[in-house]
Image (spheres, coloured by chain):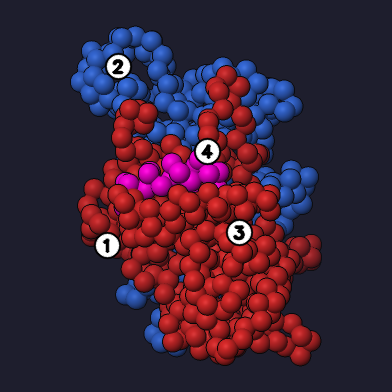
Chain colours: A blue, B red
Amino acid sequence: MHIGAQSILPSKYSRNTDKLKWSFTDETAYFGGTSLNISIETGSVAGGVDFCPLYSTAITANGSSIQVAYLLPERPPTEILEGEVVGVYYTSDATQTKTRLPLPQGPRGGWKTTTFLPIAAGPNERITELGIYYKHPAIPTSPGFKVLTLGSLHISLIPTIPERPSRITEVVSFDKGDGSTRLSWKAYKCYFSPAIRKLRSVPGCFSGKTGDFASFLVWRGKELVGVSYCLEYDVPTGVAVGDWRADGVTWGGAIVKGGGVR
Amino acid sequence: MSNAKDFTYTSKMSELADWRPEDIEIQASKVSNTPLAGRPPLPPPIHLPTATPPLIPNLLSCHYRKWGYHPDESVQGQFPAPSGPVYTAAHLHLIDTFIYFSLHLISIPPSPWINTLHRNGIRVLGTLYAHGDAGYTALSRLLDKGSEGEYIFATQLALIAETYGFDGWLINIQVPFPGEHLVPDELEAFLKELRSAVRELVPGGLVIWFDALTVFNQVGWQNGLTPLNAPFFKITDGMFTNFGWWEQDLEGTRSMANTMNRVPDIYTGVDCFGRFGLGSRDGRGFGVDKVLSLIREAGTSAALFAPGWKYEDFSGKDFESIDRKFWVGDGSNPESNPVKPISYFVSEKVCGGPEFFFTNFNRAFGKGWWVNGVVCFPLRTRFLTLSRADIECLYNRNPWIHHGCTLARSQSFRQSILGTRIN
């Protein structure tokens, strides 16, 4: 339970009449504790294309890339539908049409990531809606036919991870005097290319406190001990001293390994 | 200031006076690290008619849950999570401003709230709440001046917002100032200085006045904008009206705010527990749609007090579906449903900024924690040892992870160091 871990949750909610719907699942995630299941909830449906809107946005379309982490659910061979396509769609304010970007298929049951080519659009064109589409033949199945599990969604003119992000130092551990231990580390800006400057100037992509990182994963050896949103972490009582390391999680969700213990 | 492990608040002016920004060097986890994300306006629909009357322009959510400051709001989270239901704020695309309210004189929002709300483009305000005997005593010092004639507590409040990373203050004074004569000009000057200092230190910062104290130094809830509180509204960014209004109060408020060309800066108060005014007529819980309908017609903004009513009323049971029904509906057509959700009345805000959008769909709770699809923190057992193969698999995906581990000690790297914290 961490109030600060909440991400941007979908702002579009399915209507009862929609065939394709989203729901949260805590059974798996790409990063964190939750992912989205996209399912056909109405039972058998005729072939066609169904849409599941997720977000209203106002992102600049031209030059933006869409990156997705997703999982195609495992299915028995009899439920693999010939010709089915699942993907991301977006609507721009200029055309009001849905542009479809099919997700690569491949083996089912494992997480994949894909980055689509940058969008070519007019200079003032904005993406106003984002969601998932599903093109399928007739589905003779019961409600709850899972189409996709979505782990993350990133859209920007600038990449998920800076080409050379801030460096994270080794972790310093000290006894607070009351029997508890505090870990601390630092993050240093180390590269100042135009692309990085651009990234760091975008609101919500750089912190005066933690730099290129939205959060840190605190490791004790191979064990994940906790998540921190600052440059320190108070070790819970009962956790033994160990080889500490803090990895940074960028604002775009990429992970950068930190230094070890000093 | 209270230096409890996870939260900072106080009910004593002496502690507020003694507070220094340097104090937080020893408690960095209480400081938000997440800047306020940009939130461009929603592009207008091309083919759809504009809603009539226009939707409520801004929604302020005043978070108040059982006196405030709970373990599940802790800076490092609560692990293991409580076994029962948990309270979170999920429908943030409808909210513009969030106030953290508790019964303390000074409430500083816990950093986890600030981080999540900023990520979603929502401003977060702390609260100065003067009430009861302690509040009366506190007011005897609120207008104290420093050696250069400055209001020292205006400076302190602005510095606190800047230091902890939130966006301003709700000023809620529910007792008169001691002594027979409060010169309204003095309070106005204080508010003006506070607003100026907040704006200077916190880009986009706000000071909102709560409708209680009048220019006659009496607590007399106007339930709207009247000449008795207009001077305070005039010099702040908005007014959160008391909840006991009726239709005629709303019309009077709209009319007066209109002459000041500031109708959207009035946040008409809506008590989700339906205890006052029009709200006491079926305006509790789901019944807030009745009062929101009138607010929409009047054209003011709205302030929801204690939208967590549904968590308390239902003891958290089935919270997700009840919360959804309250905010965005149950999936049925709201036009034909007698109970309408908040989203029916309030303008929707976009998600993400003009150049950047990222989500991993995380809620504030779950059954475990995954990193790049690998589970490494099951909730109940708390720790799980990942195999070396898992770790290597994880880090092989990013070349920087292999090469960025050691703190370089070269001269060029030293030159890139900007201080103990990143500037």
- Give me the disc on residue B15: none
Q: Secondary structure at mark 1?
A: loop
Residue sticking out furthest to the left: A142
Q: Chain of mark 2?
A: A
Q: Badge 3 local density, few (<14 within 10 Å), some, or many (20+)?
A: many
Q: Position of residue B395 (x, y in %)?
A: 50, 48
Work out whether mark 4 precedes mark 3 in sequence or the reverse, and give the earlier one: 4
Find disc 1 in the rendering and name its residue. B82
Q: Nearer the viewer, residue A28 or A119?
A: A119
Please report the bounds of the magenta region as a residue range.
Answer: B284-302
Side (left or right) of B344 relative to A208? left
Disc 1 with disc 4 on a shared chain: yes
As displayed, is residue A182 above or below residue B170?
Answer: below
User: Which SS class for mark 3?
Assistant: strand
* Residue A183 visible in this rendered orientation of the protein: no
Q: Would you name the residue on which mark 2 appears?
A: A80
Callouts 1 and 2 close, C-beta under 8 Å: no
